[in-house]
Amino acid sequence: MNDENNKETKGDSVKSEKKARSVPKLVIGVFAVIIIILIIGLVVFGIGIYKLNWNDNFTRTISEYIPYPAAMVGNSSVSYSEVQNELTMLDHYYNFQEELDPSLADSRPTDNFLKKGVTTRKTRELFLAEAAANYGLTVAQEEIDNEFNIIMSQTSGINEVETALADLYNWTVNDFKEKVIKPRIIQEKVGVYIALDEEINKDQKLHAEEALSALNGDKTFDEVALEYSEDITASTGGDLGFFRRGDTYPEFESAVIALEPGEVSGIVKSRLGFHIIKLLEKISADTEADEQFHAAHILIKSKPLENWIVESLSDGKVKVFISGYEWKDECALILEKTETCENNELFNWVSSLGEVAPETINTNTESAE
């Protein structure tokens, strides 16, 4: 009897061990199935987004949680949801405008045009934000608020601004600050940094040194200005007319103040480029604020920010994942594969931040009545 009980006990023990071993296998199997389903789901949504241009509410919701990239700059990406959110905002904007004036529907940009434009602009904004970080350039909230207050001074007040932003873009004031004002400040700061960087502008500085050497030869200031200057004043000897303190860039002003009438400066660097300045005359006054200076200059312009962007984003630095589109190195735009950069109207839309960013907020929405 005891032997039979022992056999039964051993049998139960073996069964328990087998059952215990089978539980982890079952769990692993379930997890494997779940992972496979998730992978299939990701692939299906990827095909839907990139190849089939899915844009329904469910797809947009999924893309908020799964950062499918629309484009990449190096290792950083512009997400599909960022692009879609801005396209949704633009759709809201154009629909509202057409309610006010149905004839505007005829001039509405195509969805394809807007998708290229938005993806390009978000890609450029990402690049400039990373460049600013690399150069140690920051944007304080106070700077953003100050810019907004300047815009506010041209409107009827905060209530009207809030209404206009909601009606036109479905935005809050904070949305406007983050999506419009902050990127603009970043772009301006990077632009100034690039303009003042001597390594980036070494060819321009060399050209300025050549102009200075020509002045030290037998050529007059007027002749060198005509030959070398890239300013619109080149044909008039670089004549800038009269100005007071505070009317020009500080570094330019300091150089002018240090000169006596008839004297010529060395190379003076400003955000515009490299100047060679001649003080023509000075009108003294009881106060420094009332003093007037009459100067001429030879200007070799700094490398334009747009040129620097194009150079920096060439050679495969940008990858585009949206079907049918590609990055064009020669103009730093996302275009259809069959399109060329020449006379492409997308450039003006992107470089002006498009209609997403009006110079001032039009608070007059009453014409809808």
Image (spheres, rainbow, N blue to C red):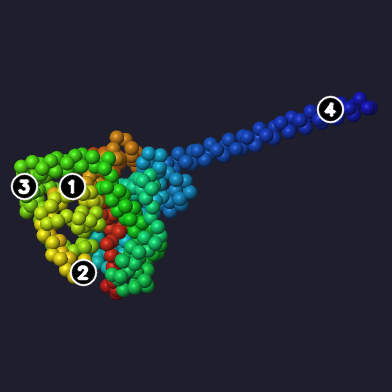
Are the residues flagged by discs 1 and 4 in contact, CB closer than 8 Å? no
Q: CA distance from mark 3 to mark 2?
A: 33 Å
Q: Residue at x 28, y 70 (%)?
A: 154
**Residue 70 % position (x, y):** 37, 44
Which tag, 3 or 4, sits closer to the chain's start? 4
Residue type at mark 4 is Lys
- Check the image and report above or below for 14 versus 288: above
Q: Nearer the viewer, mark 3 or mark 4?
A: 3
Q: Secondary structure at mark 2?
A: loop
Mark toward the start of the polypeptide (3 vs 2): 3
Mark 3 residue element: loop
For disc 3, the marked residue is 220
Pick whichever of labels 1 and 3 is earlier in the sequence: 3
Amino acid at dot 2: Thr
Disc 4 designates what residue? 10
Using the rendered image of the protein, determine whether residue 20 is visible from the camera's viewpoint.
Answer: yes
Q: Residue at x 40, y 64 (%)?
A: 172
Identify the residue under disc 1.
Answer: 266
Distance of label 1 from label 3 (alpha carbons) = 15 Å
